[in-house]
Amino acid sequence: MNVHNNSPDNTKGAFLNLDTKVPKLYISRPEGVKGKGRNIRNLFQGSVELGAKVTVMVDADLKSITPQWIQ
């Protein structure tokens, strides 16, 4: 799941074009609504609706993240 702010950097295209083993869900905030808080709310709301047992939130601003962080 990717929650996003409609930025013009093609995050949506990059995310949706990734080859994954699981279905992808892209959620964007409504036009005119701003703030990271809305994205966090959308993430957890989507997690509840999907019946997720675990949700991991990773901020896109991180530069030092490695796959081991998720494990």
Image: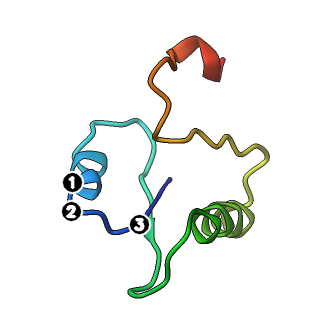
Query: Mark 2 sits on what residue?
Result: 8
Task: Please name the residue shown 38% across and 86% down the image.
Answer: 31
Question: Can you say which quadrant of the picture contains the C terminus?
Answer: top right
Q: Are marks 1 and 3 in contact (CB under 8 Å)?
A: no
Which numbered marker is on residue 46?
Answer: none
Task: Please name the residue shown 63% across and 23% down the image.
Answer: 70
Badge 2: residue crowd in 10 Å (few <14, some 14–19, many ≥20): few
Amino acid type, mark 1: Asp
Q: Are marks 1 and 2 in contact (CB under 8 Å)?
A: yes
Choose top left, top right, bottom left or bottom right for residue 51: bottom right
Q: From the viewer's perspective, is 19 left or right of 43?
A: left
Which numbered marker is on residue 5?
Answer: 3
Q: From the viewer's perspective, is 24 left or right of 48?
A: left
Amino acid type, mark 3: Asn
Q: Secondary structure at mark 2?
A: loop
Q: From the viewer's perspective, is 48 left or right of 67?
A: right
What colouring does the structure picture have? Answer: rainbow
Q: Secondary structure at mark 1?
A: loop
Q: From the viewer's perspective, is 8 left or right of 43?
A: left
Q: Secondary structure at mark 3?
A: loop
Residue 57 in the image: state x and y as whole percent: 64, 43
Task: Please name the residue shown 46% across and 41% down the image.
Answer: 60
Residue 4 in the image: state x and y as whole percent: 43, 61
Badge 1: residue crowd in 10 Å (few <14, some 14–19, many ≥20): few
Query: Mark 1 sits on what residue?
Result: 9
Badge 3: residue crowd in 10 Å (few <14, some 14–19, many ≥20): some
Rounded to the nearest whole Å, what is the CA distance between mark 1 and mark 3?
Answer: 10 Å
Residue, far right: 53
Rounded to the nearest whole Å, what is the CA distance between mark 1 and mark 2?
Answer: 4 Å
Residue 66 in the image: state x and y as whole percent: 50, 15
